[in-house]
Image: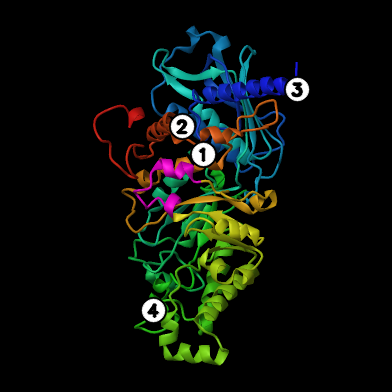
Amino acid sequence: MGKITVQRIFLGFLLQLIGLCAADLNRLNIWPMPVSVQYGHQSLYLSKEFVLKTEGTKYADASGILKDGFSRLLDVVEAAHVIELNYSHFDPSLLLQGIHVVILSPNDELQHGVDESYKLLVPMNRKPVYAHLEAQTVYGALHGLQTFSQCCQFNFTSRVIEVRQVPWTIIDQPRFSYRGLLIDTSRHYQPLPMIKRVIDSMVYAKLNVLHWHIVDSQSFPLEIPSYPKIWDGAYSIAERYTMADAAEIVRQVTYSCFSCYAQRRGINVLAEIDVPGHALSWGTGYPSLWPSKDCKEPLDVSNEFTFKVIDGILSDFSKVFKYRFIHLGGDEVNTSCWTTTPHIRNWLKQRGFNESEAYQYFVLRAQDIALSHGYEIVNWEETFNNFGNKLSRKTVVHNWLGGGVAKQVVAAGLRCIVSNQDKWYLDHLDTTWQEFYMNEPLTNITDPKQQKLLIGGEVCMWGEHIDGSDIEQTIWPRAAAAADLSFGLFCHLDVERLWTPYDKLAKDPRQITARLAHFRCLLNQRGVAAAPLAGPGRVAPEEPGSCYMQ
């Protein structure tokens, strides 16, 4: 047999394997799709005393993160229906007694780049039957519990929770270390319970960064102890967050902190102050931050008090917001106030600055302040577009204006987050879930070293037309389409991917419509107001019908 014939036979076999993999994955309803999945065609049932076992783990769980995650697992799989089965009449060999979790690291510090990988096994024919979950960190274990929850379903015949398609073998890890969702509490105040609901829904999709755009031109709702008048810029006395509120949402786990909501769910919180251009509200309490009473934005670049306030804010932030990064904004800066205000115009002349140089001076000085508090910086892309070679090498450039910038950023040796507005802005209601799914962060970035500099992506829920009444259905399910790209995409075969990686087979969104519809209905069952897939964002159901067909 000739060499070419052998190669053709091997290639045909490879394509058959890939095709079988695609067909198998089409029968799965896990979102986002794990890196590697093997499953069977049998069923087990959760026992009445389904328990958490941790023998052999190196993680002590002193702060209760794993225990709480297990409790939430039981809550979400049992919430939809009442369990009625008399277990005494059930075959014991079909009862899943619990889940055995082994965590290899004793550390539960949550930070950028933490290992989020896990391995999940649900075997058959073992006595007693336990699921097995292994992870390097507790945060990987939380992802594994979330995946296990999607393997569970209420059986209407037996009236018990069924684990279908057993045996399961799942190996998983995220494609990107940064998988973000922005919420905007300046344009419309979001009550704390709603922020917590958003965090819970992020967990279901394995997003891991809440980008909290806390303040903007319209309002400054957060207490800043160093400058207590600054939250005079809130819409009202009732629409404010105390620093204790922020601490409850985001603070790092300590042995005395049992209410740190995001941390306990594996969610980092990226706080943002958008300076100098989106800061009109700052001057309500401190009018000297305005260039003048008639021209209030951007912040006064010539006033040393401006930078003292930024320093005070970041000093207070550093006690609560422990994520490695702080977002300093820097976008949409109209410098005309600086040139039309006499004292600033004189300052520019004394310094020999034009408007662009003053903008650069402000951004770089704000960066230095952030660095002095131990932060690395995220800035919107205008800073890179105007003076990228001057930015701190600890800068992450946040791409939002369109394609092509991410490639330039990583080619310059800086890190990048992708949120291009034409594809990943949730307030753009005419952007469909298919467009969210098709947006590839690594477009035209082929150098492996440069690919590593693109740390991830973020979908943005800007708040001009969003409040507590409609935020969930505007976020979901379109944000989930981006989340699926952020987690693993490859079907692992026992051969090297010689030709076509599996993500090529998932480029047609029609292939994943049923799976996303199932996830949307799962969100509804878990109390998340996710909108139908049909139509634009935040659309209402067109007519009576099944959730799975909308």
Q: CA distance from mark 4 to mark 3?
A: 75 Å
Nearer the camera: disc 2 or disc 3:
3
Q: Which residue is mark 3?
A: 3
In this rendering, position of residue 408 left or right of residue 233: right
| Front-lying residue, 507 or 26 | 507
Stretch in magenta: 422-439
Q: Tell me what residue is drawn at x 67 percent, y 60 percent.
A: 413
Residue 38: give x, y in percent of width and height. Answer: 60, 22
Circle 4 crowding by C-alpha within 10 Å: few under 14, some 14–19, many from 20:
many
- Residue 484 - label: 1
Circle 1 crowding by C-alpha within 10 Å: few under 14, some 14–19, many from 20:
many
Element at label 3 = helix
Report if residue 337 lies within the magenta region.
no
Q: CA distance from mark 3 to mark 1?
A: 40 Å
Q: CA distance from mark 1 to mark 4?
A: 42 Å
- From the viewer's perspective, is residue 96 above or below residue 405? above
Circle 2 crowding by C-alpha within 10 Å: few under 14, some 14–19, many from 20:
many
Which kind of residue does numbered mark 2 sit on?
Ile
Residue 398: give x, y in percent of width and height. Answer: 54, 59
* N-terminal label among 1 and 4: 4
- Residue 512 - label: 2
Q: Which residue is mark 4?
A: 296
Nearer the camera: disc 4 or disc 3:
3
| Front-lying residue, 467 or 315 | 467
Query: Dividing the image into 4 quarters, which one contains the C terminus?
Result: top left
Q: CA distance from mark 2 to mark 4?
A: 49 Å
- From the viewer's perspective, is residue 290 above or below residue 250? below
Q: Is residue 94 visible?
A: yes
